[in-house]
Image (cartoon, rainbow, N blue to C red):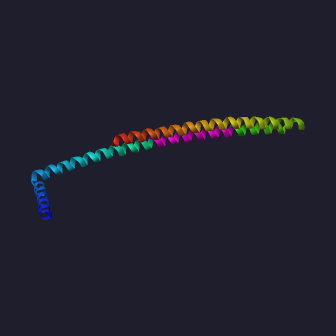
Amino acid sequence: MNQQFGKQVFGQADKLFKDLLVPGNLQVLAEQGVAASKDFYEKTATATQDSAKALTEIADSAWGSTKMLNEKLMQNLTANFEATFTAAHAIATAKSLPEILKLQSDYIQKLTAQATQQTKEFVDLSTRASQHVFEKAQAATSKTFKATL
């Protein structure tokens, strides 16, 4: 029984290969292979271009956020240095020790309040900037994923 089964399987395989080698069948198979390859290439090329655009948008967004945060940091540092120099000038021209102590106390209170406010603003800006970059990345990933399907 095994011998008969083996002959039958080999006979069917032989018939399949002979049918495939018929010029018309081989040509149809080749055309289908080329069409499938071309379709795969076009989808891959489109997905790659979309990914490149998305990465550029994400990088631009991240750079814009970094630039904005750096500008805010410089504004804060400038404001803090101006307050320090103003206080130093006032202290240097003070007439008495109690006046110096009052000016120092006022300066420390002002600088502490200013630093607290600046920190809150910077954290808020950083959070919003990070969220914006994350949303861009998420949208790009979703778009690229849908394009590959």
Vertically, is 26 above or below 119? Answer: below
Q: Position of residue 30 (x, y in %)?
A: 17, 51
Side of 46 where 68 appears, left or right: right
Look at the image and say whether residue 23 sits in the magenta stretch. no
On the image, which quarter does residue 49 sit in?
Answer: top left
In this view, the residue in front, 12 or 32, is 12
What residue sits 84% from the left and 35% below the top? 102
On the image, which quarter does residue 93 sit in?
Answer: top right
Look at the image and say whether residue 63 sits in the magenta stretch. yes
Q: Position of residue 104 (x, y in %)?
A: 82, 38
Q: Position of residue 15 (x, y in %)?
A: 10, 57
In this view, the residue in front, 32 or 81, is 32
Dominant SS of magenta comes to helix
In this view, the residue in front, 106 or 126, is 126
Residue range in magenta is 57-78
Q: Quadrant of the N terminus?
A: bottom left
Q: Quadrant of the C terminus?
A: top left
Vertically, is 17 above or below 79? Answer: below
Side of 129 where 5 appears, left or right: left
Residue occupying the far front of the picture: 1
What residue sits 57% from the left and 38% below the top? 127
Residue occupying the far bottom of the picture: 3
In this view, the residue in front, 145 or 6, is 6
Q: Position of residue 33 (x, y in %)?
A: 21, 50
On the image, which quarter does residue 3 sit in?
Answer: bottom left
What residue sits 44% from the left and 44% below the top? 55
Task: Count how many numbered circles sit on residues in the image.
Answer: 0
What residue sits 16% from the left and 50% below the top? 29
Vertically, is 132 above or below 10? Answer: above
